[in-house]
Amino acid sequence: MKKPATRKRVLRPAVTPEQRYHMINDAAYFRTLKHQLDTGEAEDQAESWCEVEAEIDAVLKHQHAG
């Protein structure tokens, strides 16, 4: 009797710390730029960095788990 085909789990390549840093840096830059264009006011860059960092880490964690 033939075994049913099993699906192989495809592993996504891990993101290096340097790639993660650049992802956060780019997203924080564009978020700050958008805020300045929308409001005409400067945004706290450290706060923006922390928020973007949490968002990127959540996405990466989700991708790693799934």
Image (cartoon, rainbow, N blue to C red):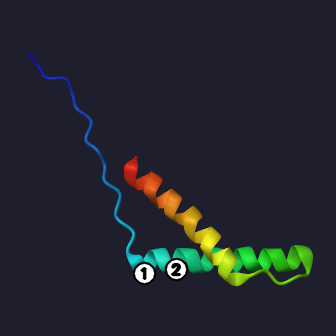
Question: Residue 29, how many percent across, how many down?
Answer: 68, 81
In this rendering, position of residue 52 left or right of residue 57: right
Q: CA distance from mark 1 to mark 2?
A: 6 Å
Give the amino acid at mark 1.
Glu
Q: Indicate which disc residue 18 carries.
A: 1
Badge 1 element? helix
Q: Quadrant of residue 42?
A: bottom right
Residue 44 x/y as whole percent: 74, 81
Q: Is residue 59 left or right of residue 13?
A: right
15 shown above or below 11: below
- The three-letter code of the residue at mark 2 reads His
35 over 58 or under it: above or below? below
Picture quadrant where residue 14 is located? bottom left
Q: Secondary structure at mark 2?
A: helix
- Please report the residue visible at 40 percent of the width from the left and 77 percent of the height from the top: 17
Front residue of this view, candidates 61 and 22: 61
Residue holding disc 2: 22
Q: Are marks 1 and 2 in contact (CB under 8 Å)?
A: yes
Q: Quadrant of residue 4?
A: top left
Give how far across and how far down residue 64 sits, in percent. 39, 55
Q: Which quadrant holds the N terminus?
A: top left
Residue occupying the point 52% across, 80% down: 22
Residue at position x 56%, y 65% in the image: 54
